[in-house]
Image: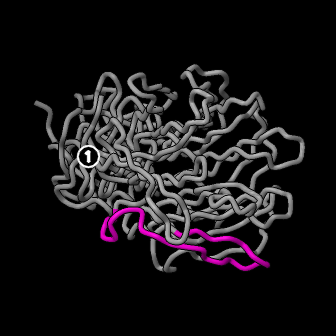
Amino acid sequence: MKTVIALLLLAIFIPQSASAAHIRTIPVEIWNLDGTRRAAFEVPMKNDGGGGVIEVADLGTDGVPEIIIGNGLGNEPRVTMYRLDGSIIGSFLAYAPSADMGVTVTSCDINSDGKKEIITGTQLNGGPHVRVFNSTGESMNLDFFAYEIWQRSGVSVKCADIDSDGQQELITAPGQGSSPLVKILNLTNGQWIEQTRFYAFSETDLSGVTISVADNLMLAGHQTGTDNAIHANVIHSPATEQFSVNAPTNTSVTPFGVDLNNDNKLEIGFVSNTRNAQVKIINGSSNITIKPKTTRSVSVAVYDIDNDGKKEIITVPTRPMHEALQSGKYIRVSVPEQRLDAYENGALVRTFLVSTGTYAFPTPTGLFSVLEKVPVVNYSWSYGANNANNYNLGPTPYNLRFKPHFYIHYAPWHNNFGHRMSHGCVNVNLENIKWIYNWAEKNTPVLIEA
């Protein structure tokens, strides 16, 4: 049996000073309504695990739409405009560079000047700060807080002429942790005027609200949890629920609407707010299923991009908001993805690349828990005299033991995260290990998936 040499022993890494620059990307995919993929391109996203949020709008006057993507969790809060071939038109920061909670985005001619604006909100753990930019990313100084300034549930934004009065309205909805209070506002003489407000669900439901607009109906789903209901509301004063349906899934969903058969009848579509999500359109007994290239959830836009009278569905990976463990904290490590996800009350709150064990020294898989938070461990091992695999890495701070001799820990000896590097532990960089060490508690579940 191997012997512990220093403070505590662990099957850990070969010390390396490897450093590699990896360009991470996420796929933008364009789908026909029969579920066939017609086009795709990759866009850069430094923390691809956080994904993005997508919108499609004609930001110019040429009748050709642009694809707008707001960066997701773990990225700077940048909004980028793309042509349909994936080339970049421009980008801008919607919030301070350090605000990495993720951005929500919509677009419409909110001030009736004949030009579409870009409107942003924040994702979970962001304040309810709504901002408005012109098509080139210049602020129009129309910022406001949709809810109490101290709330950290984020704010989803959508805009449309929801009441058919010829003027675009802005719809706001809070995320997990706040009452499901939806607000409808319009912009009059440079001032935001609230037209109406209503609770999408029970006032005490804190699961968060997902929203979309189709055929003058506002569709609302639950952001987190297992409630799969989709509520369709007509926006008058007050708002009236016209109908509700239960999506054929056992998780919360983000809804959308589309005329699938070109018969002027609206079909309801949805995305499960979970990992490995699929897009489904409810069409009687023959539902349409779209399978984007992602292990995350999916953000969806519906738009007739080629002006042929038929809508297309445009998707991009996004932050999953539903996990099997729906209460408390939970750590998931994916060995194939070399990624750690931290969930709280079912919602993804942080995601980052790690390095697990090499094929010769694999990280154990299964369901574990944080057994102990160890401030310092001296990772040291001897395979015998003069063995080239011997190592003594010295005192290493920030260590979460999830199994005897196995830790999630800081690894200052390499910068090759996203690749297998260790003797079985989970290697993390300094910024992320500080966060996960302070966030995790003793007995926090740790699921390591092969």
Quarter of the image containing the N terminus? top left
Rendered image quadrant of residue 164: bottom right
Compared with residue 325, is residue 397 higher up or lower down, i.e. above or below? below
> What's the residue at 27%, 43% (across, down)?
380
Residue 424 appears in the figure? yes
Q: Position of residue 235 (x, y in %)?
A: 55, 62
Q: Which residue is located at x 58 percent, y 76 percent? A: 145
From where the camera sits, is residue 20 visible?
no
**Residue 412 appears at what percent x and percent y?**
44, 49
Task: Identify the residue at image location x=56%, y=30%.
Answer: 260
Q: Is residue 180 above or below residue 280?
A: below
Give the magenta-colored segment's residue range: 183-206
Q: Could you say which is closer to the camera, residue 178 or residue 380?
A: 178
Q: Would you call the spot at circle 1 few (<14 residues within 10 Å), some (14-19), or many (20 or more)?
A: many
Q: Is residue 253 left or right of residue 173?
A: left
Q: Hey, what amino acid is under mark 1?
A: Tyr
Q: Which element carries disc 1, helix, strand or loop? A: strand
| Predominant SS of the magenta segment | strand
Please state which of residues 131 and 254 is positioned toward the viewer in this rendering: 254
Residue 202 in magenta stretch? yes
The image shows residue 135, relative to residue 448, as above or below, that is below
Which residue carries the number 1 mark?
407
Q: Is 386 within the magenta? A: no
Q: From this viewpoint, which residue is outermost toward the left?
A: 1
Q: Residue 297 placed where, x, y %?
A: 45, 40
Q: Quadrant of the C terminus?
A: top left
| Quadrant hosting residue 152 | bottom left
Residue drawn at x 60%, y 30% is 263
> Where does the image place residue 5, in percent across and percent down from the top left?
19, 44
**Would you place residue 389 above or below residue 254 in this image?**
above
**273 relative to 197 in the view: left or right:** left
